[in-house]
Amino acid sequence: PMGTPAVQHIARYRVDGETHHGRREADGYARLTAPPWLGGHETGTIDSLGRVSLLPPVTPTKIVCVGLNYRAHLAESATFVPGAKPPEEPLLFLKPASAVIASGEAIVYPRGVTRMDPEAELGVVIGRRARAVTESEAMACVAGLTCFNDVSARNYQRQDGQWTRAKGFDTFAPVGPWVAVGLAPDRLRIACRVNGVQRQSGNTADLLFPIPALIRFISSIMTLEPG
């Protein structure tokens, strides 16, 4: 419709003890019956900012991550992945849904971890079931984009030789605060700050495998579900 912004920010939140989805407005959230990628529509209710407690914007069944997918990150990663070089195919790993927390929630430093690093990432939220899709079909399966922190315990990443423990602790997957619907993924700045100090800066233009190629590859292995 006329006047609708090209990019909408969809949040998931609690208000008065109930969970809702809403579109971010200047003074609050326009409540929806469901997220728009599941056919939700506006209810006419505006939930004011002061009454809303933000939740993770999605509740994923699985979190599929891609390692060593930024050209600039490869040299840095050689410390943890000896001989790291550009992979010929995407390097996949999973984080458990139990690691998810909302944006702004505390990350717990587990006992035994001697180095814990943030990794700011582009999160791609799937909006429709995707199984063996082509690259030309891939973006039609995307609901929107969000911010994601792939928190990593570096000593376990080096020690174990695979990354399940290093990246799977509870609280190691902050996501949100919302899903940006209608935002193109190909030239976005990715930045991470810890206590106001910039620790990371990159751009999705630096991806070795762009998003449509990743969705094609991953969906040829495992079905991707909405959310």
Image (cartoon, helix red, strand yellow):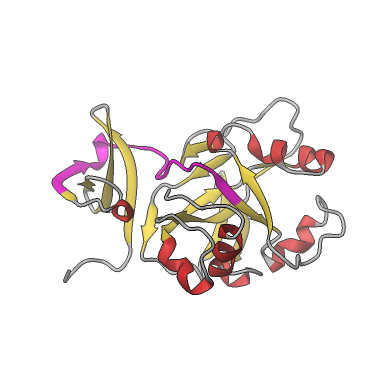
Q: Is residue 3 left or right of residue 79?
A: left
| Residue under the point 81% across and 39% down | 160
- Quarter of the image with the N terminus is bottom left
Q: Over which residues does the magenta segment extend?
A: 43-64
| Residue under the point 30% across and 49% down | 35
Rendering quarter of residue 151: top right
Instruction: Give the total number of marks visible in the rendering.
Output: 0
In the picture shown, does residue 197 fall above or below 172? Answer: below
Q: Nearer the viewer, residue 159 or 91?
A: 91
Residue 70 point in image, percent of width and height: 67, 65
Residue 157 point in image, percent of width and height: 77, 42
Residue farthest toward the left in the current orientation of the protein = 44
Q: Is residue 150 left or right of residue 144?
A: right
Is residue 49 inside the magenta stretch? yes
In the picture shown, does residue 208 fall above or below 15? Answer: below
In the picture shown, does residue 88 fall above or below 163? Answer: below
Q: Is residue 31 left or right of residue 101?
A: left
Residue farthest toward the right in the current orientation of the protein = 83
Residue 118 point in image, percent of width and height: 63, 46
Q: Is residue 154 left or right of residue 220?
A: right
| Residue under the point 81% across and 50% down | 80
Is residue 94 inside the magenta stretch? no
In the picture shown, does residue 13 fall above or below 89? Answer: above
Q: Nearer the viewer, residue 89 or 46?
A: 89
Residue 13 point in image, percent of width and height: 32, 38
Q: Nearer the viewer, residue 225 or 96?
A: 225
